Amino acid sequence: MNKEERSKILEKQAHIEALRSKRYKSFKIMLRDPAVYIICEKKKILTGIRNKCNALYVGESTMMAKRAAAYADLKHPNNELVAKLMNKLKKPREYIIEKLDGNVHVKCLKEFKTINNDLQRQEIEGYMINRLNPLLNTSKRKGYFKRSFIEKKESESDYWEEVEDTYKTELYVFGDTKTIYHVGKKDFVKRESVDGHEAMHIQCQRSFNTWVKENNIKNRKNEWKKDPEAFYASLTGLRDLWKYKKLKDDDRVTLPEKDIR
């Protein structure tokens, strides 16, 4: 075999190896299944009105299938979800299992392009914790997170949707009294009734509309497009709230109260 023939054989072998590397993956890569997950109750039993979407817990993992196994079997003695709830609510295992049985579902967020980036995935997790206020999360609740992982859009509807969402998740908090005044019926109704939820929505929307006028939101879209962080930091309530969140490690700081209705 001459030198030229040997060179061609080696080139062919290298080409085959390159194709094989594309078709096959290592066990480490195959096991990697990054996601942010949200565990919720189907029916609000253990969660309260402040836990949006009946959220129990938000977490992130590089191996979602393995992580799910830690929560799947509620009767397993080492089930993490049951253990967390027992510690939080100070209730016996049997009580927690009874309330969770058939009443738990999970949402997995995997569609973000940056989900494989550990820092970006943790940022998504932190944002969801702040937005949903899950019953069991505490460590990242006071963190300073923003939606930098979401591609900025600039339409009129995107602007108003984001502003309203920011107000309702960062500033507004629904009350927890048993009754609430319904302006349409001109009477108090049970908060957990259909009329009660309608009354909460009306009060929330009125509060938002007042805040919009106070901050001239209608005419500030260009500020939002140019520098969204500076825009939000200039708004009533968010100005102090975000300032104190950045100083969260200072024990002398007290966060301003949200608008509770």
Image: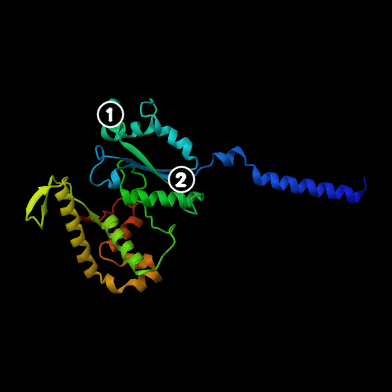
- What is the x, y in percent for residue 117? 51, 51
Q: Residue at coordinates 36% horizontally, 44% vertically from top-left?
A: 139
- What is the x, y in percent for residue 161? 32, 62
Crowdedness near tag 1: few (<14), some (14–19) or many (≥20) residues, C-alpha within 10 Å: few
In the picture, residue 243 is in which quadrant?
bottom left
Q: Residue at coordinates 36% horizontally, 50% vertically from top-left?
A: 128
Q: Tag 1, which secondary structure? A: helix
Query: Which mark, by number, is residue 118?
Result: none
Which residue occupies the foreground of this view, 142 or 175? 175
What residue sits right under mark 2 in the picture?
35
The amino acid type of the residue labelled 2 equals Ala
In the picture, measured across the screen, residue 80 lies left or right of residue 171, that is right
Q: Residue at coordinates 84% horizontally, 50% vertically from top-left?
A: 8
Q: CA distance from mark 1 to mark 2?
A: 28 Å
Q: Earlier in the sequence, mark 1 or mark 2?
A: 2
In the picture, measured across the screen, residue 116 lies left or right of residue 134, that is right
- What is the x, y in percent for residue 21? 68, 45
Q: Quadrant of the C terminus?
A: bottom left
Q: Is residue 15 above or below residue 94?
A: below
The amino acid type of the residue labelled 1 equals Glu
Q: Quadrant of the N terminus?
A: top right
Which residue occupies the foreground of this view, 46 or 86? 46
Which residue is the extreme one toward the left?
A: 187
In the picture, residue 212 is in which quadrant?
bottom left
Which residue is the extreme one toward the right?
A: 2
What residue sits right under mark 1 in the picture?
98
Q: Tag 2, which secondary structure? A: strand
- What is the x, y in percent for residue 217? 28, 70
Crowdedness near tag 2: few (<14), some (14–19) or many (≥20) residues, C-alpha within 10 Å: many
Q: Is residue 161 above or below residue 12?
A: below
